[in-house]
């Protein structure tokens, strides 16, 4: 059989198949047509959502990266001012003539290195608007949650505890049961301690010291914070029990020495 004949047969077979499919769809009635139309719409919507989600994730990541350039920049404070050199009495040579004193060259003025900040406050003052922009623009994305958590820690470092607590709570709401929820809970506990709300801090730390939190958090470190919170709240017996738990359950912990010192201090006050 010639190539042209085979090609003609293939075209005929394809045309027959298309005709059969058309007849089947027409015979199935309007219900199938509606179903197919809905399927096409669903595919379009899914494709549009996927494109939007990818675009949002990309833009959120770009905003976060820009903010972290500032938030993670090193702090290089200027050197302390040098004390003035007292004038030395005029020296006299062997011949009785005055001898000129050596000239003291003043130090060169300090120049802030590029990409650094003189203080933590200066750095975070510039970083916070960028972090909050990323968090507010894309609140449900991983980048947006990360940006809000970093904003909360920056606000706490500046002593703006009420604003920090609000941002930590928003992280917890957005992240559900993720790792940032655990970290934000600890951050919120530190804020409550700084505000003097010891009972609120203790509740948060107790929630973070259970076995289910061990996957995400260093429990020995959480227990140290909890013991200190008990101590600040005047609950000495619970503080002692918590520090003792660090020593017994985590004998190789980096916090062991601190736990021993805390116990000794509590014993001295007893």
Image: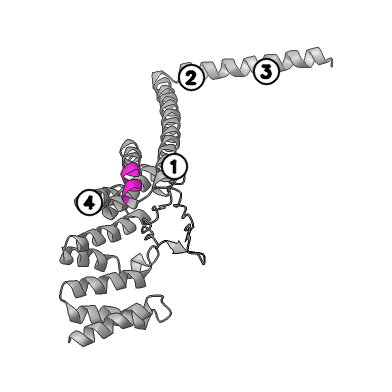
Q: Is residue 226 above or below residue 53?
A: below
Dot 4 or dot 2: first in sequence order is 2
Residue 125 magenta-highlighted: yes
Which label lies toward us, 2 or 1?
1
Count every numbered label the image shows and give the total. 4
Residue that badge 4 annotates: 160
Residue that badge 3 annotates: 13
**Residue 254: horizontal and vertical position, in percent?**
41, 75
Which label lies toward us, 4 or 2?
4
Residue that badge 2 annotates: 25
Dot 4 or dot 1: first in sequence order is 1
Asked which secondary structure carries label 4, the reply is: loop
Dot 3 or dot 2: first in sequence order is 3
Mark identifier at residue 65: 1
Look at the numbered discs 4 and 2 and tell me whether their residues touch, using CB distance below 8 Å.
no
Name the quarter where the C terminus is drawn.
Answer: bottom left
**Residue 126: horizontal and vertical position, in percent?**
34, 42
Mark 1 and mark 3: span between their CA atoms? 57 Å
Q: Residue at x 42, y 20 (%)?
A: 33
Mark 4 and mark 2: span between their CA atoms? 67 Å
Which label lies toward us, 4 or 1?
4
Q: Residues within 10 Å of mark 1 (few under 14, many from 20)?
A: some
Asked which secondary structure carries label 2, the reply is: helix
Asked which secondary structure carries label 1, the reply is: helix
Dot 4 or dot 3: first in sequence order is 3
Query: Which region is colored magenta?
Result: 121-128
Q: Is residue 41 above or below residue 239?
A: above
Q: Residue at x 17, y 63 (%)?
A: 200
Dot 1 or dot 3: first in sequence order is 3
Mark 4 and mark 3: span between their CA atoms? 76 Å
Look at the numbered discs 3 and 2 and tell me whether their residues touch, using CB distance below 8 Å.
no
Name the quarter where the N terminus is drawn.
Answer: top right
């Amino acid at each position: 059989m010639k190539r042209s004949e085979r090609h003609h047969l293939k075209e005929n077979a394809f045309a027959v198949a298309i005709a059969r499919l058309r007849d089947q769809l027409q015979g199935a009635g309007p219900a199938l047509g509606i179903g197919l139309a809905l399927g096409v719409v669903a595919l379009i919507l899914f494709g549009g959502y996927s494109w939007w989600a990818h675009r949002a994730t990309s833009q959120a990541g770009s905003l976060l990266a820009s903010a972290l350039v500032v938030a993670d920049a090193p702090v290089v404070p200027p050197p302390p001012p040098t004390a003035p050199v007292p004038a030395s009495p005029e020296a006299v040579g062997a011949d009785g003539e005055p001898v000129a004193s050596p000239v003291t060259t003043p130090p060169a003025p300090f120049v802030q290195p590029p990409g650094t900040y003189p203080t933590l406050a200066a750095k975070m003052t510039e970083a916070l608007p960028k972090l909050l922009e990323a968090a507010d623009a894309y609140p449900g994305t991983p980048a947006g949650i990360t940006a809000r958590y970093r904003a909360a820690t920056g606000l706490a470092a500046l002593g703006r505890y009420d604003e920090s607590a609000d941002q930590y709570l928003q992280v917890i709401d957005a992240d559900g049961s993720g790792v940032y929820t655990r970290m934000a809970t600890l951050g919120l506990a530190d804020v409550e301690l700084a505000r003097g709300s010891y009972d609120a801090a203790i509740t948060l730390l107790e929630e973070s010291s259970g076995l289910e939190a061990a996957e995400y958090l260093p429990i020995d470190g959480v227990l140290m914070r909890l013991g200190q919170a008990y101590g600040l709240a005047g609950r000495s017996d619970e503080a002692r029990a918590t520090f003792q738990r660090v020593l017994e359950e985590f004998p190789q912990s980096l916090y062991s020495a601190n736990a021993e010192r805390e116990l000794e201090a509590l014993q001295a006050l007893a």
